[in-house]
Image (cartoon, grey):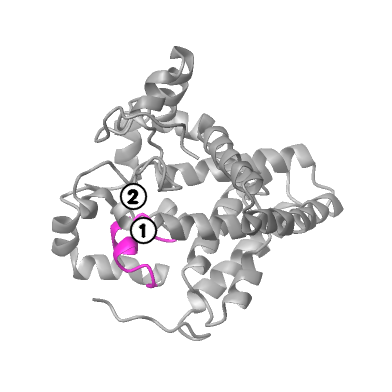
């Protein structure tokens, strides 16, 4: 087992530097031409989400309240930090990975629900099972399920869910106020926010698969390029699930040091890089939408 790291200002300097670069770049891009700023802001918005993920796991300081303050205002405007935190930590219950109901980040549907869908909606979900579909419509589909689930929880009396959404309103308003004060068009910022969330779909597309062996459900993508940095090495996802307390910049070295162990653990669920992922699945479904290990037992759409 890797030793548990105790965050400190010295050892966590890569995270602090990335935070400064992310927010600094975001501000500069608000005053840049649209042809540069829209894609650039999408990158910064995706990077902040990766930083939120890092902070959810206890970095870069020993103080959770301070960590949360560094990323609480979600630049993507769509996902409250508190909800991201709670759903993601629930996702780390590995024995429930890919479960259509108990894994908040699952892209599978209960087979009974799937077969009850009209044909046109099945085709929409099948397109979403390709990488092209995930980039184009994946944000809309996941946001629909996410918000529907939260509305149901709020109506059922979940005060914590309501609290996180209410706290998100002033945080999102602050982001929008800065955008307006910078003279940046809101329509362009909304486009960039969608683009940032779409970029994150590249990371989540192949992170998990349905498999009877829990340890074989989580992937490694051995990429060390642009996407690896954008996702803060979360492409070494099997390593992250095994050692969720390890800082992002330590994951590649840990993987290299125990590569054979991880290959055996996830039964070869490994891709060389994101280029191979695009080449193989851009227009091809990676897996079926109905959970392939589930029988048709009845139920309701995932919530």
Q: Position of residue 21 (x, y in %)?
A: 60, 66
**Whether residue 241 is situated above or below residue 266 in the rendered picture:** below
Can you say whether 39 is above or below 259 in the image?
A: above
Horizontal and vertical percent position of residue 289: 36, 29
**Residue 55: assigned label:** none
- The residue singled out by tag 2 in the image is 97
Residue 88 vs residue 176: left or right? left
Query: Could you tell me residue 243's position as x and y percent?
Result: 32, 69
Image quarter of residue 222: bottom left
Q: Residue at x 38, y 36 (%)?
A: 108
Q: Which residue is mark 1?
A: 93
Q: In the shown orientation, is residue 258 left or right of residue 289?
A: left
Can residue 151 be seen here? The reply is yes
Give me the residue at 50% from left, 40% from top. Answer: 303
Number of residues whose C-alpha sits closer than 10 Å to that of mark 2, classed few (under 14), some (14–19) or many (20 or more) = many
Q: What distance separates the C-alpha of mark 2 from that of mark 1?
A: 7 Å
Q: Quadrant of residue 152?
A: top right
Judge left or right: residue 140 versus residue 4: right
Give the residue displayed 56% in from the left and 74% down from the top. 16
Which quadrant, please, contains the N terminus? Answer: bottom left
Tell me if residue 34 can be seen: no
């Amino acid at each position: 087992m890797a030793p548990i790291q105790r965050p400190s200002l010295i050892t966590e300097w890569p995270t602090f530097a990335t935070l400064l670069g992310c927010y600094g770049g975001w501000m500069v891009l608000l005053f840049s031409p649209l042809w540069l700023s829209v894609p650039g802001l999408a990158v910064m918005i995706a990077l902040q989400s990766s930083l939120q993920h890092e902070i959810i796991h206890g970095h870069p300081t020993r103080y959770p309240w301070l960590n949360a303050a560094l990323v609480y205002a979600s630049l993507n405007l769509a996902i409250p930090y508190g909800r991201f935190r709670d759903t993601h930590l629930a996702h780390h219950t590995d024995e429930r990975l890919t479960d259509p109901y108990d894994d908040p980040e699952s892209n599978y549907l209960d087979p009974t629900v799937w077969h009850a869908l009209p044909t046109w909606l099945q085709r929409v979900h099948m397109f979403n099972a390709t990488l092209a579909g995930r980039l184009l419509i994946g944000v809309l589909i996941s946001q629909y399920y996410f918000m529907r689930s939260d509305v149901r929880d709020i109506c059922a009396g979940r005060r914590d869910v309501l609290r996180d959404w209410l706290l998100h309103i002033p945080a999102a308003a602050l982001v929008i106020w800065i955008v307006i004060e910078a003279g940046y068009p809101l329509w362009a910022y909304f486009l960039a926010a969608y683009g940032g969330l779409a970029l994150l779909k590249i990371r989540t597309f192949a992170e998990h698969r349905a498999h009877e062996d829990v340890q074989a459900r989580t992937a490694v993508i051995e990429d060390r390029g642009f996407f690896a940095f954008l996702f803060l090495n979360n492409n070494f996802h099997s390593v992250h699930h095994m050692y969720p307390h390890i800082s992002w910049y330590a994951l590649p070295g840990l993987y290299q040091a125990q590569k054979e162990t991880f290959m055996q653990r996830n039964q070869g669920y490994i891709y060389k890089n994101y280029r191979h992922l695009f080449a193989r699945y851009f227009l091809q479904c990676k897996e079926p939408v109905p959970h392939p290990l589930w029988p048709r037992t009845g139920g309701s759409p995932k919530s």
